[in-house]
Image (spheres, helix red, strand yellow):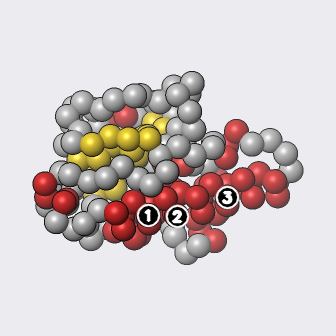
């Protein structure tokens, strides 16, 4: 871990799709500015369709795996904690101790979609594209100088 970069931790329930995508996109678009991590309450393994749709856009998830939030809770100084659960009824944690900023950036769970293989694949693609767009918008809203102060806006809605 590079302690010079603020840690951004993406959290969701299974750490199989949304948080894995968010981690990979942040690493791809701003790995020089942030240390990207992800975890879940009930890690389920990285979903095969997550791997497939990320490879479609040229991003390998090699080296990423599902992790429990207990691997990080109280063990890393996460500057930003971003919850990617779709709504409050899901079992995502609501707060993260000692984070300078935490907020929700909710997305539908593509792993919950039922249907044909093509319909399921399209659901993963749609969420992938939404996640990348929101992360890019958030990165544009954060001035480089605010990283050190710990002040940044919540992501655009």
Residue appearing at x 72%, y 53% in the figure: 123
Lower sequence index among marks 3 and 2: 3
Q: Name the residue under label 2.
A: 133
Q: Name the residue under label 3.
A: 126
Label 3, residues with CA under 10 Å away: few <14, some 14-19, many ≥20: some
Q: What element carries label 1?
A: helix
Q: Compute the Cα span from label 3 to label 2.
A: 11 Å
Q: Can residue 28 be seen in this view?
A: yes
Q: Of residues 131 and 62, which is closer to you in this image?
A: 131
Q: Is residue 145 above or below residue 38?
A: below
The dot on residue 137 is 1
Left or right, 129 with respect to 121, comes to left
Q: Is mark 2 on a helix, strand or loop?
A: helix
Left or right, 75 with respect to 51, comes to left
Lower sequence index among marks 1 and 3: 3
Label 2, residues with CA under 10 Å away: few <14, some 14-19, many ≥20: few
């Amino acid at each position: 871990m590079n302690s010079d970069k603020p840690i951004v931790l993406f959290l969701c329930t299974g750490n199989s799709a949304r948080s894995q995508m968010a981690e990979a996109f942040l690493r791809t678009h701003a790995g020089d500015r942030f240390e990207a991590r992800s975890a879940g309450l009930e890690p389920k393994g990285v979903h095969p369709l997550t791997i497939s749709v990320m490879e479609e856009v040229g991003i390998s998830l090699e080296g990423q795996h599902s992790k429990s939030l207990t691997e990080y809770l109280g063990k890393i100084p996460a500057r930003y904690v971003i919850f990617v659960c779709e709504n409050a009824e899901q079992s995502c944690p609501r707060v993260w101790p000692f984070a300078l900023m935490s907020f929700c950036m909710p997305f539908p769970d593509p792993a919950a979609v039922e249907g044909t293989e093509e319909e399921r694949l399209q659901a993963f693609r749609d969420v992938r594209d939404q996640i990348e767009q929101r992360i890019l918008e958030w990165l544009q809203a954060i001035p480089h100088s605010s990283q050190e102060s710990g002040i940044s806006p919540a992501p655009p809605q």
